[in-house]
């Protein structure tokens, strides 16, 4: 078929329609000179052109032949020659005997050599003719004389040489073309004296330029052979063609068996050779071993080693290195290295340098290894001094100057060596050996290298710049280069500044990923004014740099994201992180360094556990105890809520990796926990969320948790996130951060928001200067002479280092204080009235500080009084309080004194504690002195009702009217917006599936019409509600009813409002279901386009066991209570308002991979197709997916828009609520929070602005947490605590070990000799306990008045004892000791059996594993001894597993109890004790008990630590250490028992002495045996008791109260009314006998009937119950009635009826009183039953008859008859067929009417029977009747 012609094809021929298109074929074109050339399009093969002969004499061919197009494989194309064939033959024959120089026409070259030196060699081969100028005729000079240097004749040669293709201007090209160039030059050295030589004539037949096919038969090192598929043409011999490797065009090394296409040269007739080889098909066979063995690479072996010695001989340096590992076959590891062969960047080698060397494989090399070449890969920095580095840099700079001048080959090699030796630059850029001169020299070198490195070496230079920018020269804080730049700017050295700026430009251009640290070099050169334009531009540059790099390690501390980035998660390592250290001693360099240190460390502590957990998870080394992982996460629903800023709560169903037995005791998914959700499972697409509601019942029932997305840190919007959750629902992975993110996030956010220059207490915290008085204790005079309180932070910044007495000069007598708070007015009136006449009124503040009030009595001890008085005069005050010294008491007194100041700040005093329990205790003490209206507690519910009343959430609001109106307005707007968001959410859920409405909304109008019209309605057999079958005509009629409008627009606008539109949607639903392909198609789409795994493959050895790791359950519950108490959690989830997100049955959903697949699909072509019924199933599936995706995007945009409006209202309402709370708190005097609560409610603190902060347990608070709670408004800070006890908890141990992050602010200040006061008297422990603390608190004393009542346990011989054992521990993640645990549990049980309450005994364990073991054992013990452990539901929390408190030492700090048992666990042969070696932990363990302290452990193991050895030696001196514990009878001390093991504890009657203790009655003695232990408050002795009122006596038990007894002596009393006697108990004297007289008396009713009644009964209430006979009037039957109850009309006759039924005449069997009912006649009913049975028998008999007849007829049908079409039977008017004959006759005749004008005449009637159908009918008849 010709191009451009059209051919009609039948419509049914679909294949022909699909195959229509323009054919591709070759065309012949005609050139301008009448010749013809062959061209081809890009798909056809290349057609080689015939070459024309070369005219050696210079005659120019006037005909021009077009140049052939370059082939797709890049082979060289040839140009035509001009001249005679004879001259060409002569030239070729003389080529092998003469070599001459040739000047080439440079304008004719087309090939591009690769290497410059090859070009230079070729240029030297040919003559040095000048390059022709533009427009000048080109000439070629051929030297034909014998003297190569003398030219005798020149000839003009025009045209092109056959294989001469050289292009000078593009030097870098293919190496193969260079070799072709060389051969062409050798062929063109022509000599004019060669005409007489005989040569082989070359004709067109032997000029073989056409491509030929063949197969590679043999391969050598650099050449090979091709076996041609066809015989070679004459004059070539054989079928094997030689080729060199460099001419292979594909740049692939050929192997034997490859199919190739090649062209041949005619220069070697006897040795056929190929000029070009192109591989067209690679073989799968491997490369022969011989080729590998003989290759150049295989002749050497490589190894590394370090230089051990250096020698010099004959001005040649060499050395020896020891190889790390030698290849096989080498005798020794010592390798000689000549330094001239080493690439070392120009630096002198020293011992210890590590080199990479290449060895030969010759035999002599194996016996005496010698380095053919070497490279320096690591420098020995210890052997090189600062002078060496400086000298190297100077020499390198000089060398670069020389290279710039020469630029020869050797210089270029030196340049490459300098720029590519990374080992040298790593050493230089460490910066520890660089002075300012060296830095300047380094900058010059880097700038000089930029000028010298061309494009060839640009990659090496880029790597060098990247290495430099990653070095310590670019540190985060005060980097070396930054200090250098700062000094240069300060000195005004413009040259250095210009160099730095040039380097910055170069570095950002070549290493944009390091833009952030590079831009920091600009900072020293700009103005320090924060409002300057330079600062603004610098800030803008930093933002842009951060956007470019997106690398967290390069960011400043105030720019770091609060959550880790993808790069940080995948590459972060705490070991490699350059984190700063806390300065335990000395000041920080600047406030910036201070904030940078604590922010980075706090962020690392918050995120390192999560990051390392995810990293281990991806690597396959994950331990489930490190982090909680949840699989198969599924989106179950959404809820629009007003309890969060996001306004949206999301319900997720998941499966924990480690199953949870009881969610009530699990620490997983606590409120506020941070979650990372990965839809793909590889954590490159993390969605961040937090737990906003934890319903334990919901978790137990369906494992569902409610979360809130962290919109601030997620890159995707809510709609996009929900789309991802829905898309990968059931396949997602979720991990939970080990750290409580809700407490970290506000702190980190607040730290970044702090203005560093306005940091609170900057002098004290950063510079560690001595404190000055607070501003509200200082006054200054106004201009008018009046006093005003100076609220400046520093009154005199020059007096920071003065002592406390110097500060009193700031005080004035006008500020007064109520001294009676610590010096009670009544006790001190006489002593102080002379000095202060107005006593007990207020006294001046300066007198309060100066006067020690020695003569005054006080409620404080001496150390407490000094601490209180001195701390008031310091802006930052520290009070150290050893255990039991009354730190809370002192804190309350300080609070009272501040409130009594006449200059007291108006803002409330903020009280911060570490634990919720400590806050409750502090506020209880405050409420003793202040009314509840003055105190507020911020946080969740408290267990104390009194504190719950002062909770901020329960306070009566005193809002302003404006706030009330604003709150109502926002609530109203939110109520209006909420349904819109819910509607959009439901629409978003429906958009994920293909429905008729979704199809119409996204498809074109033509597609909607095609779906309706093209549907095969007849085959579907669907009906309308009226029974009409749906056909194409019916559908078309409905389409016509829609009018002339666009059908799509009509349906979308009329849906739900028009019946026709609803009918159309019904049609569309049916058609869409028919048109939709099967599920297999969507599975194919999923498999075809899926690019990522949706389920992560856990390679880790994670054994998913039940969550029985209970070691932290009790601690976790306490932690959860602390969180809830701090955060004021509210119930979020309301299942009634939950919008379910679940796949709709029967609907096609979105394939998970479609978002990525749509980028690869022809979306426009699919969407624009009109006839959708002609689409293939795959195309239909793809179109459905595209439409769903579009619909989802539109629904997502609408949902996001609605949600953003709602979120805005939520934020504004939260702001109003925050203002309301702040207004309430500003009206208080005291507000209390935990430090976690202060972190969470940080925004509230900023509005309240408390001027005074009192921190109790200050040594347990991390410094950044405390700093975040302070602000520029804070004027005074009190730190009360004990740094000798446990430090603040840090989740990451490495931050403690290497960075000292667990040092609190209090401890850090004390380490720097900060002024402080120490409390000296303890009020908790027995005095002997204090002696064990003397090595920690040398000056600690006991307040004997308070502790003398702490009696030792009566059942123990000693108040304290160290119970030694040798039972071995069991290790693992945590340590435990089962035998030791049993000893502790049995000891606790013994104490409870000896009259101690369970709540008075505590067991402490050093490790969580031991605490978990103790809880399990104690739980079993309490169940076995329920008599000693009664549970009172009102008093004991059901969630507590044991009544005896069991906890770890760390979690028990701050608590105390009567008796404390400490399990120390560690017992091993290696004497390892782990973290027990810290003195702080020992201090806590031994300072919790009041009356009894018992340590259990291995003293041999613990004595290896000096801190334990000191205590053990002290106890051994008092005989309080040993393997035997002595327990005694509490009442008979001489009865004692030695206990060595847990089973040795006595049980039952171990003391058989009579108890003889006075009972509670005070009269009798206990007659029981002393043991088992029993109580004495129930004396059971029988005694006689006399009643006071009656004088009667009785017997009772002694413990029974007489007032509770009743006298049971029987007495007789008479009724005052009737005189009847009655007997009753004595204690019943008070009752009225008249009302209760039971004597029976006769009585006559008004009707005349007589009866008996009780004497006390009322006659008017009595009823006559006598039965009276009478005769019924209707039937005359006899009957009875009750006299006082019934009348004759109330009685109905119960006799049988004697009448006959009028209808049947049978007697009636009903009662007489009832009317006769014929239907109830028994006789008639019996007859009907019998008749029914008879009819059933008749019907059955008839059925059997018909069945038998049918069977008989079936049997009578012959097989032959069944094969006939029908059976013809003639009917006769007589005989057996007469009835049937006349029946048909009558029907015909009756049908014919006169009006029909048809008069039939019947002659013959024949009956036609289809036997096959008749048989089927009979079988069906038989079957139906048989049923």
Image: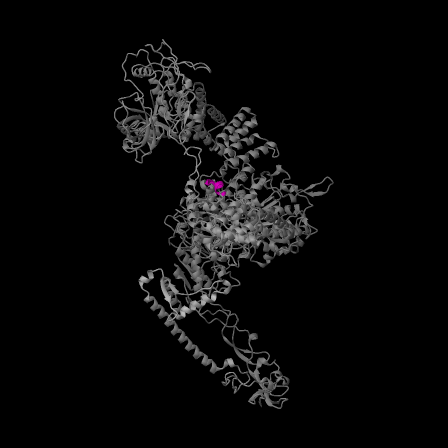
How far from the left and from the top, in percent, is residue 629? 45, 49
Of 18 and 976, the residue lying toward us: 18
Magenta segment boundaries in residue numbering = 1159-1167
How far from the left and from the top, in percent, is residue 455? 45, 26
Residue 961 horizontal side relative to residue 616, left or right: right
Residue 1011 horizontal side relative to residue 295, left or right: right
How far from the left and from the top, in percent, is residue 775? 64, 43
**1764 in magenta:** no
Answer yes or no: is residue 737 visible: no
Quadrant including the C terminus: bottom left
How far from the left and from the top, in percent, is residue 247? 34, 26
Residue occupying the far right of the picture = 784
Of 1140 and 235, the residue lying toward us: 235
Q: Is residue 113 above or below residue 1528?
A: above
Q: Is residue 1506 above or below residue 218?
A: below
| Residue 535, image quadrant | top right
Residue displayed at 69% across by 45% down:
813
Q: Is residue 1628 above or below residue 762?
A: below
**1160 in magenta:** yes
| Residue 396, image quadrant | top left
Residue 883 horizontal side relative to residue 230, left or right: right
Q: Is residue 1492 above or below residue 1084?
A: below
The count of marks equals 0
Quadrant including the N terminus: top left
Answer yes or no: is residue 1020 visible: yes
């Amino acid at each position: 078929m010709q191009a451009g012609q059209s051919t009609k094809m039948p419509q049914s021929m679909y294949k022909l329609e699909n195959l229509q298109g323009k054919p591709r074929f070759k065309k012949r074109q005609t050139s301008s000179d009448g010749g013809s050339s062959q061209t081809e399009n890009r798909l056809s093969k290349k057609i080689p052109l015939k070459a024309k002969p070369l005219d050696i004499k210079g005659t120019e061919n006037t005909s021009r032949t077009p140049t052939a197009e370059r082939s797709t494989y890049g082979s060289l194309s040839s140009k035509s020659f001009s001249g005679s064939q004879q001259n060409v033959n002569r030239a070729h024959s003389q080529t092998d005997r003469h070599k001459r120089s040739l000047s080439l026409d440079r304008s004719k070259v087309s090939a591009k050599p690769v290497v410059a030196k090859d070009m230079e060699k070729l240029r030297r081969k040919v003559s040095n003719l000048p390059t022709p100028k533009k427009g000048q005729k080109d000439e070629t000079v051929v030297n034909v004389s014998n003297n190569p240097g003398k030219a005798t004749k020149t000839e003009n040669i025009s045209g092109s040489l056959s294989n001469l293709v050289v292009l000078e201007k593009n030097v870098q090209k293919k190496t193969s073309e260079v070799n072709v160039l060389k051969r062409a030059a050798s062929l063109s050295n022509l000599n004019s004296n060669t005409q007489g030589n005989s040569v082989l004539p070359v004709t067109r037949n032997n000029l073989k330029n056409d491509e030929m096919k063949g197969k590679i038969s043999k391969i050598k090192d650099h050449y090979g052979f091709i076996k041609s598929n066809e015989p070679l043409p004459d004059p070539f011999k054989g079928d094997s063609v030689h080729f060199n490797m460099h001419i292979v065009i594909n740049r692939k090394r050929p192997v034997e068996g490859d199919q190739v296409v090649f062209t041949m040269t005619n220069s070697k007739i006897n040795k056929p050779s190929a000029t070009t080889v192109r591989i067209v098909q690679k073989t799968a066979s491997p490369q022969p071993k011989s080729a590998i063995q003989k290759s150049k690479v295989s002749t050497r072996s490589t190894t590394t080693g370090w230089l051990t010695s250096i020698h010099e001989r004959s001005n040649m340096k060499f050395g020896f290195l020891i190889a790390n590992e030698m290849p096989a076959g080498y005798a020794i590891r010592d390798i000689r290295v000549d330094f001239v062969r080493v690439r070392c960047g120009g630096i002198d080698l020293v011992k210890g340098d590590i080199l990479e060397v290449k060895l030969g494989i010759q035999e002599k090399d194996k016996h005496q290894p010698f380095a053919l070449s070497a490279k320096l890969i690591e420098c020995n920095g210890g052997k090189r001094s600062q002078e060496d580095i400086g000298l190297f840099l100077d020499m390198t700079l000089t060398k670069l100057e020389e290279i710039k001048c020469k630029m020869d080959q050797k210089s270029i090699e030196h340049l490459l060596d300098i720029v590519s030796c990374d080992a040298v630059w790593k050493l230089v850029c460490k910066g520890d050996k660089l002075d300012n001169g060296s830095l300047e020299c380094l900058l010059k070198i880097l700038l000089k290298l930029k000028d010298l490195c061309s494009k060839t070496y640009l990659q090496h230079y880029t790597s060098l710049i990247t290495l430099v920018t990653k070095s310590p020269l670019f540190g985060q804080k005060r980097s070396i280069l930054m200090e250098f730049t700062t000094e240069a700017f300060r000195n005004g050295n413009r040259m250095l500044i210009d160099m730095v700026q040039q380097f910055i430009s170069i570095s950002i251009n070549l290493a944009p990923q390091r833009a952030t640290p590079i831009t920091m070099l600009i900072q020293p050169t700009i103005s320090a004014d924060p409002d300057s334009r330079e600062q603004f531009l610098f800030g803008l540059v930093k933002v842009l740099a951060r956007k470019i790099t997106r690398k967290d390690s390069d960011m400043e501390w105030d720019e770091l994201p609060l959550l880790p980035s993808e790069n940080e998660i995948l590459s972060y390592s705490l070991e490699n992180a350059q984190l700063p250290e806390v300065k335990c001693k000395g000041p920080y360099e600047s406030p910036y360094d201070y904030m940078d240190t604590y922010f980075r460390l706090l962020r690392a502590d918050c995120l390192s556990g999560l990051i390392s957990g995810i990293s281990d998870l991806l690597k396959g080394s994950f331990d489930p105890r490190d982090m909680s992982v949840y699989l198969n996460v599924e989106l179950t629903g959404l809820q629009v809520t007003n309890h969060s800023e996001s306004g949206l709560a999301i319900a997720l169903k998941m499966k924990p990796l480690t199953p949870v037995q009881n969610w009530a005791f699990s620490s997983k998914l606590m409120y506020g926990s941070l979650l990372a959700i990965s839809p793909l499972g590889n954590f490159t697409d993390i969605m961040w969320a937090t737990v906003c509601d934890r319903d334990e019942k919901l978790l137990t029932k369906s494992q569902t948790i409610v979360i809130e997305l962290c919109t601030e840190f997620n890159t995707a919007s809510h709609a996009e996130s929900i789309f991802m959750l829905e898309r990968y629902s059931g396949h997602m992975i979720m991990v939970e951060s080990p750290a409580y993110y809700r407490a970290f996030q506000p702190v980190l956010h607040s730290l970044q928001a702090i203005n560093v220059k306005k940091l609170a207490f900057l002098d004290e915290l950063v510079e560690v200067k001595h404190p000055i008085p607070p501003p509200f204790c200082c006054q200054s005079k106004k201009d008018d002479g009046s006093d005003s309180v100076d609220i400046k932070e520093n009154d005199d910044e020059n007096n920071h280092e003065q002592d406390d007495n110097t500060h009193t000069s700031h005080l004035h007598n006008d500020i007064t204080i109520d001294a009676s708070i610590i010096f009670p007015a009544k006790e001190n009136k006489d002593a102080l009235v002379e000095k202060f006449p107005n006593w007990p009124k207020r006294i001046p503040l300066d007198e309060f500080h100066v006067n020690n009030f020695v003569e005054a009595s006080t409620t404080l001890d001496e150390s407490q009084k000094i601490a209180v008085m001195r701390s008031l005069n310091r802006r930052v005050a520290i009070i150290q309080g050893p255990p039991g010294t009354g730190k809370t008491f002192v804190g309350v007194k300080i609070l009272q004194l501040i409130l009594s100041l006449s200059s007291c700040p108006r803002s409330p005093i903020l009280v911060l504690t570490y634990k919720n329990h400590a806050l409750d205790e502090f506020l209880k003490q405050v409420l003793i002195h202040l009314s509840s209206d003055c105190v507020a507690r911020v946080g969740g519910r408290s267990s104390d009702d009194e504190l719950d009343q002062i909770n901020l959430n329960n306070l009566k609001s005193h809002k302003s009217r404006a706030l009330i109106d604003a709150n109502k307005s926002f609530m109203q707007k939110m109520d209006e917006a909420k349904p819109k968001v819910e509607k959009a959410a439901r629409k978003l859920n429906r958009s994920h599936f293909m429905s008729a409405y979704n199809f119409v909304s996204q498809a074109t109008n033509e597609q909607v019409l095609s779906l309706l019209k093209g549907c095969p309605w007849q085959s579907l057999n669907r009906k309308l509600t009226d029974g009409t079958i749906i056909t194409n005509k019916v559908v078309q009629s409905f389409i016509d009813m829609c009018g002339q409008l666009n059908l799509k627009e009509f349906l979308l606008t009329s849906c739900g409002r028009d019946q026709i539109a609803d009918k159309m949607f019904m049609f569309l639903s049916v058609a869409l279901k028919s048109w939709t392909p099967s599920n297999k198609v969507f599975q194919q789409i999923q498999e075809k386009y899926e690019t990522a795994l949706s389920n992560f493959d856990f390679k880790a050895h994670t054994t998913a066991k039940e969550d029985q790791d209970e070691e932290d359950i009790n601690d976790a519950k306490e932690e959860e209570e602390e969180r809830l108490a701090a955060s004021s959690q509210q119930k979020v989830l309301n299942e009634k308002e939950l919008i379910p997100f679940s796949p709709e049955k029967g609907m096609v959903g979105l394939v998970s991979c479609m978002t990525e697949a749509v980028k690869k699909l022809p979306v426009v072509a699919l969407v624009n197709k009109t006839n959708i019924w002609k689409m293939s199933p795959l195309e239909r599936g793809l179109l459905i997916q595209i439409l769903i995706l579009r619909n989802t995007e539109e629904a997502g945009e609408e949902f996001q828009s609605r949600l953003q409006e709602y979120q805005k209202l939520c934020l504004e309402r939260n702001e109003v609520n925050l203002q309301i709370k702040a207004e309430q708190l500003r009206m208080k005097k005291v507000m209390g929070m935990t430090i976690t609560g202060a972190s969470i409610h940080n925004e509230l603190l900023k509005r309240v602005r408390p001027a005074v902060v009192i921190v109790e347990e200050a040594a347990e608070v991390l410094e950044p947490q405390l700093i975040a709670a302070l602000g520029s408004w804070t004027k005074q800070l009190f730190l009360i605590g004990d740094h000798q006890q446990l430090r603040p908890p840090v989740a990451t141990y490495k931050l403690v070990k290497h960075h000292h992050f667990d040092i609190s602010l209090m401890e850090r200040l004390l380490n720097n000799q900060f002024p402080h006061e120490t409390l000296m008297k303890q009020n908790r422990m027995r005095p002997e306990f204090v002696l064990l603390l003397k090595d920690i608190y040398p000056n600690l004393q006991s307040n004997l008045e308070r502790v003398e009542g702490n009696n030792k346990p009566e059942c123990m011989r000693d108040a304290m004892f160290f119970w030694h054992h040798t039972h071995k521990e069991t290790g693992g993640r945590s340590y435990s000791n089962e035998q030791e645990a049993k000893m502790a549990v049995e000891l606790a049980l013994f104490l409870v059996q000896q009259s101690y309450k369970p709540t008075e005994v505590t067991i402490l364990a050093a490790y969580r594993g031991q605490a978990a073991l103790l809880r399990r054992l104690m739980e079993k013990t309490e169940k076995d001894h329920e008599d000693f452990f009664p549970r009172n539901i009102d008093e004991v929390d059901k969630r507590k597993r044991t009544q005896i408190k069991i906890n770890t030492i760390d979690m028990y700090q701050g608590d105390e109890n009567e008796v404390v048992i400490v399990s120390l666990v560690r017992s091993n042969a290696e004497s390892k004790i782990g973290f027990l070696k810290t003195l702080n932990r020992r201090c806590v363990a031994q300072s919790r008990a009041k009356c009894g302290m018992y340590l259990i452990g291995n003293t041999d193991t613990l004595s290896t630590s000096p801190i334990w050895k000191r205590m053990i030696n002290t106890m051994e001196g008092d005989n309080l250490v040993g393997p035997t514990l002595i327990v005694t009878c509490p009442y008979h001390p001489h009865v004692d028992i030695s206990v060595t093991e847990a089973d040795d504890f006595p049980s039952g009657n171990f003391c058989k002495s009579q108890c003889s203790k006075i009972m509670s009655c005070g009269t009798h003695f206990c007659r029981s045996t002393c043991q088992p232990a029993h109580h004495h408050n129930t004396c059971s002795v029988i005694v006689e008791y006399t009643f006071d009122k009656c004088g009667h006596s009785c017997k009772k038990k002694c413990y029974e109260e007489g007032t509770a007894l009743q006298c049971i002596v029987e007495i007789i009393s008479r009724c005052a009314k009737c005189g009847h006697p009655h007997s009753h108990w004595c204690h019943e004297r008070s009752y009225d006998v008249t009302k209760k007289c039971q004597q029976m008396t006769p009585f006559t009713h008004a009707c005349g009937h007589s009866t008996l009644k009780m004497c006390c009964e009322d006659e008017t209430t009595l009823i006559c119950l006598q039965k009276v006979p009478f005769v019924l009037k209707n039937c005359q039957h006899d009957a009875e009635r009750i006299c006082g109850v019934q009348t004759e009309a109330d009685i109905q006759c119960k006799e049988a009826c004697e009448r006959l039924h009028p209808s049947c005449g049978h007697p009636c069997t009903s009662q007489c009183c009832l009317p006769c009912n014929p239907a109830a006649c028994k006789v008639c009913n019996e007859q009907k039953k019998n008749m029914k049975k008879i009819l059933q028998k008749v019907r059955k008999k008839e059925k059997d008859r018909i069945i038998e007849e049918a069977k008989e007829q079936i049997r009578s049908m012959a097989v032959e008859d069944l094969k006939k079409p029908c059976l013809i039977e003639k009917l006769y008017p007589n005989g057996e067929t007469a009835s049937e004959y006349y029946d048909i006759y009558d029907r015909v005749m009756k049908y014919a009417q006169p009006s029909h004008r048809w008069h039939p005449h019947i002659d013959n009637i024949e009956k036609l029977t289809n036997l096959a159908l008749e048989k089927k009918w009979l079988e069906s008849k038989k079957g139906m009747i048989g049923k």
